[in-house]
Amino acid sequence: MTGGAGRAWGALRAGWRAPLPPRARLGLRAATVVACVGFATAPYWLGGSYYPDIWVDMALWATVGLGLNVVIGFAGLLDLGYMAFYAIGGYVFANAALYHGLTLWETLPLGAGLAVIASAVIGFPTLRVRGDYLAIMTLGFGGIVYVAAKNLTLVTGGDNGLYGWRAPTLLGIQFVQPLDFYPLALGLVVVTALVTTGLRGSRIGRAWVCIKDDELAAAASGIAVIRYKLYAYMLGSVWAGLAGAIFAAKQSLISPQSFTFNASFFAVAIVVLGGMGSPAGAIVGAIFYVVIAEWLSAYTGTLSGVIFAALLLVVVLFRPAGLIPYRPRVPRRRLRRAERAGLPGATDDYRLGV
Amino acid sequence: MESEPRLAIRGVSVRFGGVEALADVSFEVGAGEILGVIGPNGAGKTTLFNTISGLVRRYEGEIHLDGRPLRGLPPQRIVAHGLARTFQNIRLFKSLTVLDNVLAGQHRHIVETVLDSALHTPRYHREEALATRRALQVLHFVGLGATDPGALATSLPYGAQRRLEIARALAAYPRVLMLDEPAAGLNTGESWELATMIRRIRATGLAVMLVEHDMRVVMSICDRIVVLNFGRVIAQGTPAQVRADPAVVAAYLGDAAQP
Ligand SMILES: Nc1ncnc2c1ncn2[C@@H]1O[C@H](COP(=O)(O)OP(=O)(O)OP(=O)(O)O)[C@@H](O)[C@H]1O
Ligand SMILES: [Mg+2]
């Protein structure tokens, strides 16, 4: 690189880091919103038949990434069997639809509920053990669910899977094509993103990050470490249960292949790629993953796996906090609200109002 | 001292394998009192704090906070009973902001259900606003009022990190505060500011326990001092009494800090 170009690059980087003036910040925010809305609605203006599956899968993987981000990114619990909850959601939907004639709408809360119950049952004994064992035990749980899906033929259909339920309907509209499910999946992404981000900025989210940073100091600050780990595990799993149900409905077939260890591994990779603890990162990580695994693989075959691994490696090496790192900050609104209520004065007590 | 001590330690012993870290330790701390705990390296001072705060669970003897036994309680329950502490090696939450570190100390004073947290209900906003004001007040009290509350805790200079850890402990609104070598690594000026601050903390009616190697700080602000050596209490009393105690002089003060 020549000196001039080097300087220009340096100036660009410095400018990138420098705080933007308020109007520019507003403009940037507006541009981001437009870009996000544009991207999210792309399947419609690109023409609905353009890789219909990819769009729904992006949304479902984004949900998976956002949910797992609660467990790994917020609470720092390495979960290598997360897709087990996706499988539970999927099989709950398939069984309810096939044998009990329930609709997708009735099934979604059921899938979510069972995922939460399963996570509580697994988490309760598991989360007492130290971190490194947790990874192994969640790995085992993922394996057990996979083996169960293959062998509990009565409820899972074994290797052949389950299929043949009637297409879900809403307000008389049938959900048949993959893209019919897109608004639902996109809605789930939005809700998951809002709720998980909301949790992060609250008492429970702070407690999770405290536990991730320093369990001992967290306990000494009054945080019930094991209980909050369990909360993280449960509040992370619920999203996989919901996404799994929509996934099964969209595929109109559910079989064990979707829930191998690889799937759980890629879920972790999405969180790491996007940025641990970063909801926006989880979404971007999912987009990268689906584009490479489903679109690029049409041209490169199995090479796409190598490409994804290479991308992951490059990010981990050169941008360890992920593509969109989580930036801790204090919302100005919060400080303004506190100021309006009357700021602390130079009293000789650390307690307010004494 | 008032009728019932804030904290009462009676015959506490702790063993780590062959090491007798604490042996039959007994003393009391009252409200509005600063109790110094001194002793050579490895005397058992940190172990004493760890035992009181529930990090060491296996011990003999009894520990009472406001008359209530602490035996068997996990650390977070002991915090709920009114105990807060800092650590010898600063243990701030490194991926949290300055404000969030103090809010973490407020944890059990914030009344939010999971639903409030997830959906940001009016109660969430009310509680967080109140907690934020309380946290800012604590930051102000420890002299971090001018610090950017949105900065990462670990981006602060060393002395400010020590203050922030005290702020986090104070934010729990404890009845007993335990400080483990808060002046370690501070320069003389900072140490005196710290001493002044600990006096201001005492003035609010807290019982303060202070482990500290800086003898000038200890001797000037402590009301009473307990001296540990090899896990045993070898002396306790006012700074003047302790300084004059031959056992203390022999075991610890020796030539190092004798005025
Ligand atoms: N978790 C532990 N396991 C085994 N031994 C321990 C443990 N914690 C402390 N000890 C031992 O107990 C003794 C007292 O240690 P402690 O840390 O309480 O001393 P201290 O008075 O705080 O010393 P310092 O002034 O160096 O901080 C030491 O011999 C130490 O090696
Ligand atoms: Mg110590």
Image (cartoon, coloured by chain):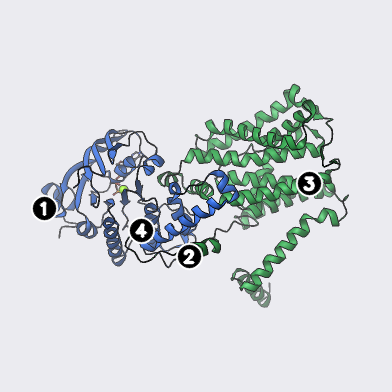
Chain colours: A green, B blue
> Regarding mark 2 in the picture, which secondary structure is present there?
helix
Q: On the rendered structure, is A58 left or right of A324? A: right
Q: Amino acid at mark 1?
A: Ala
Q: Indicate yes or no: mark 4 CB to ligand 2 under 8 Å.
A: no
Foreground label between 4 and 1: 4
Q: Eyeballing the image, is B152 above or below A192?
A: below
Q: Amino acid at mark 3?
A: Val
The correct choice, above or below, for B140 with respect to A203 in the image is: below
Q: Foreground mark, 3 or 2? A: 2
Q: Earlier in the sequence, mark 2 or mark 4?
A: 2
Seen at 34% across and 49% down, the residue is B174
Q: CA distance from mark 2 to mark 4?
A: 17 Å
Q: Are marks 4 and 3 on the same chain?
A: yes
Mark 4: secondary structure: loop
Q: Residue B121 or A262: which is nearer the viewer?
A: B121
Name the one closer to the observer, A79 or B229.
A79
CA gap, disc 2 to disc 1? 52 Å
Label 3, label 1: how far apart the Cα atoms are: 79 Å
Q: Which mark is residue B216?
A: none
